[in-house]
Amino acid sequence: MAFKLSIHPWVHSARYNGETWTGKYIEQRHLTPAEEAALDDEAQLALANERNTFPHFPLVNYTTQYGLGCFEGLKAYPQPDGSLKLFRPDRNCSRMASSMKGLRMPPIDEQLLLKSILETVKRNANLGFTPKYNTAWENDFWQSAAAVYIRPFTYSEPGIGVNTSKNPWVITVSTNVSAYFVPGKNEAVTSNRVRATPNGTGWIKTAANYVISTLAKSEAVDEGYMEAIFLDAATGKNIEEGTSCNFFALFPENKLITPALHDTILPGITRSSIITMARDKGLEVTETDLPISDVLENAEECFVTGTAAGITPLGSLTHKGNKREFSSLKENSLSMNLLKELKGIQYGAVEDRYSWMTAV
């Protein structure tokens, strides 16, 4: 399982008081990592539940009642020298502020959020709760490697009537994670559900968007697929994104296409990084509408990108019973080469020529 509810002891809580953002670090109850690992399952669960409890936050509010909330997801990667580095955390802080504006909340101070993320990871690392680099990860190009997942999220003030949040919290927690997608055939299928509609919240990393995504992915898994792919709401003909990831397709003559950032598509940070890397490799990268028919007829490779997914090559895509296989999983494919380079940068094995990594 990629995500396990084992929140690290140190968390950060920021609050908007109507004028400014202020924050504080909170140390939840914990033992040493070794002592916690030695607990039986029941005791481990009890401790995890205790660390996931914040009694001073209101239960009845606009977030719990109406899904009025947004969040971010970013990772700190163990390095061969024993340190930890975060991948483009400034971009996550900027997107968090943008999401909050989109929900008509006062946006978090980006520098406060960045500082709190770095310090929270550092404090938990000092307690020994973060993973150490393992050379065995190199055997599959870090696809099964561990990392620290950091989750800042909003939580509104008390309220039961439908309303916007004027004095939200932003809480930052972290936990260790492993591979999001289990390597294999990596087969995907289009969903008949609609993730987002024009003039909606598809471009915001809001919690509400993930209800449809969760249902679509669950249905795909039940049918034997790894991932579900959404088509656009207006025509049902164009690929938009996966359940938690952006979509790319490689066509003949080194043409790489990814859906343009309409207001129905999340502006992925890994997505923008891949566009930069691919152009530096000499590919013609285009952001435009991407018809499912064109992908099924002409694409050579397909892959999805995201913080959790990283780069995940797709072995096939099925649409209305029509299955198309791709060469994405072959050793020298563009998908695999991009995967190796990105993971190598993140885990300190490839030169960070873009200055994307930030030391903790």
Image: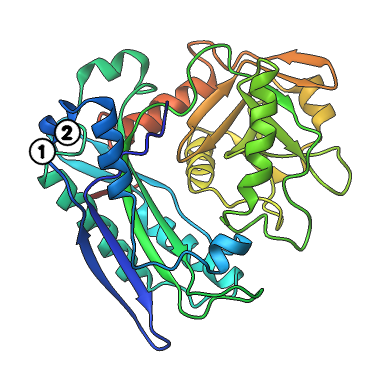
- Is 121 placed above or below 22 here? above
Residue at 46% across, 23% down: 337
Around disc 1, counting alpha carbons within 10 Å, would you say few (fewer than 14), some (14 to 19), or many (20 or more)? few
Residue identifier under label 2: 36
Asked where in the image residue 140 lies, by quadrant, the reply is top left
- Residue 101 percent across, percent down from the top left: 56, 72
User: On the rendered image, what quadrant is the N terminus found in?
Assistant: top left
- Residue 96 percent across, percent down from the top left: 47, 62
Residue at 40% across, 24% down: 340
- Is residue 76 in view from this perspective? no
Residue at 75% across, 15% down: 324
User: Left or right: 27 with respect to 282?
Assistant: left
Helix, strand or loop at disc 2?
A: helix
CB under 8 Å between callouts 2 and 1? yes
Helix, strand or loop at disc 1?
A: loop
Q: Amino acid at mark 1?
A: Thr
Residue at 55% across, 14% down: 329
Q: Which coloring applies here?
A: rainbow
Around disc 2, counting alpha carbons within 10 Å, would you say few (fewer than 14), some (14 to 19), or many (20 or more)? some
Label 2, label 1: how many angstroms apart (C-alpha)? 6 Å
Asked where in the image residue 45 lies, by quadrant, the reply is top left
User: Left or right: 205 with respect to 355?
Assistant: right
User: Left or right: 163 with respect to 281?
Assistant: right
- Residue 304 percent across, percent down from the top left: 58, 32
Residue identifier under label 1: 32
Q: Nearer the viewer, residue 322 or 227?
A: 227
- Residue 312 percent across, percent down from the top left: 52, 26
Q: Amino acid at mark 2?
A: Glu
Report the residue that reaches farthest toward the bottom. 19
Q: Nearer the viewer, residue 266 or 205?
A: 205
